Amino acid sequence: MSLKILLAFAIIIFSSSLRAQFALIGDAEHMPGSCIQLTPDYDYREGIAYSTSYLNLQNYFEIEFDIYLGDKDVGGADGITFVIHNDPRGFQAYGTYGECMGYGRWSPYYDGGNFIAPSIAIEFDTYQNLQQNDPASDHVAYLENGVSLHATHWNDDNDDYNLEDGRLHNFRFRWNPNNKNITVLLDNKVVFEGTKDLVNDIFDGETKVIWGFTASTGRAYNLQYFCFRRLALNNLPAIHPVQKSQREIYSEAP
Ligand SMILES: [Ca+2]
Ligand SMILES: [Ca+2]
């Protein structure tokens, strides 16, 4: 590939010195390798890790991590969220523990307590909380502005879907500023697709945002962590809107 093409694609991949790239809050801690613990295997914990580099929502990006949600299906909780925000507290922003996973708040009808906003998040939820409209199974859901309550979810149409299986699960988040498309893949399956004008409808015109992961436990608990895989930033002209056929190919990739 020529230098010109390389420049045209302008792909920047960060793959080293992860240690310097995340600001940690609460129970978050560096682990061996390129992994960061969000919660230890103890009750009532909360940990958050934010990349110290901002994202620019005018650019295409794809973020890839492996996430670990523990090994206790019974008695395990609560899950991890991937968050993008420009909360006024910046790198100190945090939400409520337990079912709110360090991101949200107990109820959307009560503005008190801690939650991260303005924001969007993808939750990987491993514990059923009826107050947040959770199904009995583990699930993925799209959240906004620190509200943990969600109307819909993805659980692979499997009432026994379980993420607390002692394995890493591959997670990818893709943003296309051209068509305002958000695509989330988990273990190579599309688990969320949506169209949202993030800059105008969520961030009030702001294009520079903070991103990272939050997690918490409550009475039930699990070790929860994430491991860096890839961050790809791409200038717009090189990218065409994602076509359905491309998505299918992508989601079927090994
Ligand atoms: Ca839950
Ligand atoms: Ca489970």
Image (cartoon, rainbow, N blue to C red):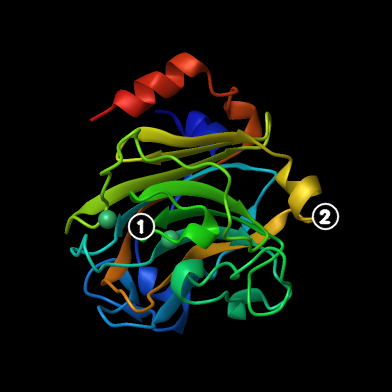
User: Does residue 182 appear to the left or right of 161 in the view shown?
Assistant: right
Q: Nearer the viewer, residue 27 or 206?
A: 27
Three-letter residue code for mark 2: Asp
Q: Position of residue 55 (x, y in %)?
A: 61, 56
Residue drawn at x 35%, y 28% is: 251
Q: Earlier in the sequence, mark 2 or mark 1?
A: 1
Taking depth in this image into account, of 103 and 75 the one nearest to the observer is 75
**Dot 2: element:** loop
Q: Secondary structure at mark 1?
A: loop
Q: Which residue is mark 1?
A: 15
Find the residue positioned furthest to the front: 130
Q: Is 251 drawn above or below residue 226 in the view shown?
A: above
Q: Is residue 45 left or right of residue 60?
A: left
Other residues around mark 1 within 10 Å, as few (<14) / some (14–19) / many (≥20): few
Tag count in the figure?
Answer: 2
The residue furthest top is 245
Q: Residue at x 78, y 47 (%)?
A: 201
Residue closer to the observer: 59 or 218? 218
Q: In the figure, 98 relative to 45: above or below? A: above
Instruction: Determine if residue 21 is in view.
Output: no
| Camera-nearest label, 2 or 1 | 2
In terms of image quadrants, where is residue 247? top left
The answer to whether mark 2 and mark 1 are in CB contact below 8 A is no
Q: Quadrant of the N terminus?
A: top left
Place of residue 73 in the rendered image (x, y in percent of width and height, measured from the top left): 21, 60
Does residue 229 sit above or below 39 in this rendering?
Answer: above
> In the drawing, what numbered circle is on residue 204?
2
Quarter of the image for residue 189 reads top left
Report the quarter where the C terminus lies. top left
On screen, residue 251 above or below 61: above
Q: Few, some or many C-alpha atoms within 10 Å of disc 2 (few <14, some 14-19, many ≥20)?
A: few
